[in-house]
Amino acid sequence: MTTKTAEIPKEFHVSPFVCNRYLVDGELKTWKGNTTEVFSTILTPNTEGEMAPTLLGSIPDMETPDALEALKAAEKAFQRGQGLWPTMRVGERLKCMETFVQKMKLHREEIVKLLMWEICKNKSDSYKEFDRTVDYIVDTIEAYKNLDRKGAKFDKQGNVYAHIRRGPLGVVLCLGPYNYPLNETFCLLIPAIIMGNTAIFKPAKHGVLLIAPLLKAFQESFPPGVVNILFGRGRKIAAPIMQTGAVDVLALIGHSSSAVSLQDQHPNKNRLRLVLGLEAKNPGIILPDADLDLTIKECISGTLSYNGQRCTALKVLYVHESIVDEFNRLFSKAVDELKFGMPWEDTFLTPLPEPSKPDYIEGLIEDAISKGAKVLNKKGGDRTENYTFPAVLYPVTENMKVYNEEQFGPVIPIVSYKEIDEPLDAMAASEYGQQVSLFGRDIRKIGPLIDTLANLVCRVNLNSACQRGPDVYPFTGRKNSAVSTLSVYDALRSFSIRTFVASKDTAYNKEILESLLNSETSNFVSTEYLL
Ligand code: G3H
């Protein structure tokens, strides 16, 4: 699929943008070294008039000494717990965050446009990603106020008073994924800094330029060194930072192989807290009495929203043998009816942002066919330069790559089962344990199944597709799928530790505590109720 410039609505035209700035120690520095060009896989006429990937601009290809300078800035801002930011009153930190979110809102249109070009997300979902992120920040501010209010008191057990709060952990290295380059990165970065940590943040492989409009907002909203933003390759930036042992929290949404290799670089693993959202192979289990119309609708959205490039996507469907033929017929028809187009046309299917993805998906299809599967839908596997039309594969068996690998793209493996133990055994043997979708009605079957499934994954979606939202609900996983829990509420806990002041109930201590509370000498000891 190609597009001609004339077909692009004026408001979505792009011209190459040189991002030559990065943020370290509160300073927006100008990068003078090597750069990397950023292309969209969307084809437009190049200077020779040939259709080619669209040049969107360039980003710094930063080197290890620059990364270590950013680390030093984050360490200096935390200053072993003595820095301005980690000791600041919670209310003051929240004001900084409120300033940031106001400034961020001003960049909605340019960020949405870059989401469409850089990662080919359709228009509605790009706006949704931006708005959801703003809501997430606003909700996080409220959640922290609540958390702080709960800590604004003294407890007494035996003859010991305790003033218990949550404190920061230190320096956070924050790495996000390309499929939600704004939202998921900020779901790590925002709670991390709001809790008083300092951070070094490097955007993902794709969806990088869209961070550039926010550099100034970060600079103007937070004290120097609280947020440091770098551009470049993981091996030159993230790995050397980890090797210093100065990182207290690795916050990463991406693949477990990256998370493990970064952990391995850290010399003191016992000191490293992990907040990880990793890969998954969420199954859909379709029982014989499932409402097929509803199931097809949810399976389309579950398998193919954003072309299946979601960690929560349904990546394998187990359909009972008694209904598999009917399911396959209806599902294949529904897939072939899906519209492909450019992100600004707001079609359900859009180009794939990774240049190598169409070949990879084609490889999965060929492997499955060579082992006995068929492509059920007419358009399945149709290729263009930047796309492979979703292929419905059946019957899929354990020896096929698409059964085992997280495809993260438009191909849907269908497995037929006779006994419910077949999908359950597969889930128990799987490396992943994020979520499942269960389609059916009979509570005598569903009831005991839920009891088992809840112990194999962390969210059982009844007659609905898997998803992360609403963002107030816990988002986590078992096995290789996650470490720690993310939600508006849980992330504040994941990025902090309980720490408290205790004192024996003596007249001497009481007098001191009372004076402390009546003075403003401690920001930690406070019973102030945040409004
Ligand atoms: O890539 C994984 C995302 O967390 C999925 O989030 O379910 O809201 O699309 P979502």
Image (cartoon, rainbow, N blue to C red):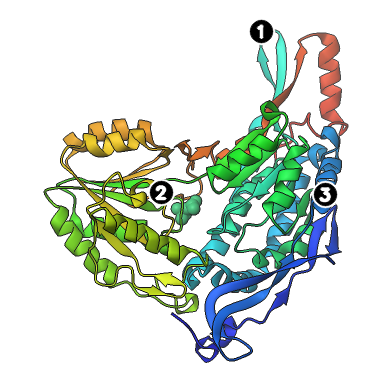
- Residue 121, given in percent of the width and then of the height, sits at 50, 68
Q: Nearer the viewer, mark 3 or mark 1?
A: 3
Residue 165 is at least partly visible in this image: no
Where 397 sits versus 264, above or below? Answer: below
Three-letter amino acid code of the residue under disc 1: Gly
Disc 1: which residue: 158
State the count of labels: 3
CA separation in Å, label 3 and label 1: 42 Å
Q: Is residue 373 above or below residue 107?
A: above
Q: Residues within 10 Å of mark 1 (few under 14, many from 20)?
A: few
Location of mark 3 (residue):
225
Residue topped by disc 2: 405
Q: 103 or 453: nearer the eye?
A: 453
Element class at badge 1: loop
Residue displayed at 60% across by 59% down:
182
Question: Mark 2, mark 3: which one is toward the viewer?
Answer: 2
Picture quadrant where residue 398 is located = top left
N-terminal of the two: label 2 or label 1?
Answer: 1
Crowdedness of circle 2 by 10 Å Cα count: few (<14), some, many (20+)?
A: few
